[in-house]
Amino acid sequence: MLYEVAKPVVAAVLRVVYAPRISGARHIPDEGPAILASSHLSGADTVFMPAQVRRTVHFLAKSDFFSGTSLASRGFGRLMRSLGVMPVDRNGGSASEGAIEAGLRILRSGELLGIYPEGTRSPDGRLHRGKTGAARLAIATGAPLVPIGMLGSFEAQRGRRIVPRRRPRIEVLVGEPIDPADALGDLEAARADPQAARLLTDLLMLHVQQLTGQDYVDTYAADVKAALARGESAPRTTRASR
């Protein structure tokens, strides 16, 4: 897979140009399924985080990116797959259900799945309410949730900058895994409880906030983006950083 060929090259370039740091990498299992649930501050996160993780990290993308019929579109789709990005099929169900099915396939193969629980990049550098997909996958499979916090990438790409600035240094902070069985107890019961995924998601976002020190707002990032686009004020911080 191209991912395995390109990753050492990309990682080497990042080390020379940006000198990124990762701490807590020992918390990522050496084998078996796990969900890397990361804060999302900029597009740079999708390169800097997996480049510093030893194992292959699979991400999900909507199938629109893979479905073009032109030569360029087909080539782009193959490139995305070779880089470990899996298509989420929207046909026959909601996008969220398609993502769950794709995520289950990755985890049941014993792989690492990368997810941004906020659902989109933070529009203001704060940490936002998490969507429950990562928790649902953890409950369904028993795979641990590994909280990851990104630092510096928001400032490095502030102002829609394509190429990140070299300062501040981008850091990847990895926290201790959350075992869904330890957090919720009986997973069979949790699978039947519609509130279990929300409880586990809120616990996950608390762990991420403790890693990054970001202010937290209990509103989805997409809703904050929409409010700002309408010229409205952003929601107030719910849980301030310490």
Image (spheres, grey):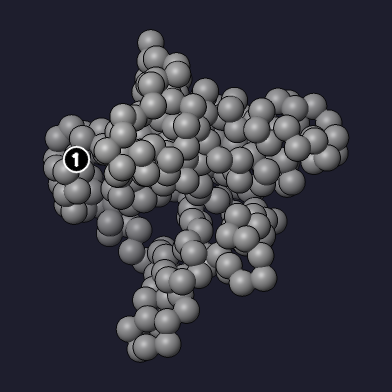
| Residue found 49% across the figure and 27% down from its top | 218
| Residue found 80% across the figure and 35% down from its top | 193
Q: Nearer the viewer, residue 189 or 225?
A: 225
**Could you tell me residue 128's position as x and y percent?**
44, 32
Position of 30 relative to 11 (above/below): above
Q: Quadrant of the C terminus?
A: top left
Position of 123 relative to 176 (above/below): below
Would you say 118 lies left or right of 107 here? left
**In the rendered structure, which amino acid carries the disc numbered 1?**
Arg
Would you say 165 lies left or right of 179 here? left
Q: Nearer the viewer, residue 226 or 14?
A: 226
Q: Quadrant of the N terminus?
A: bottom left
- Please give the residue where the numbered disc 1 appears in the rendered image: 158
**Could you tell me residue 80's position as x and y percent?**
42, 69
The residue carrying pointer 1 sits among few (fewer than 14), some (14 to 19) or many (20 or more) residues within 10 Å by Cα, namely: some
**Could you tell me residue 31's position as x and y percent?**
60, 47
Q: Quadrant of residue 202?
A: top right
| Residue found 51% across the figure and 58% down from its top | 60
Tell me if residue 178 can be seen: yes
Would you say 35 lies left or right of 181 here? left
| Residue found 52% across the figure and 23% down from its top | 206
Tell me if residue 123 can be seen: no
**Residue at disc 1, secondary structure:** loop
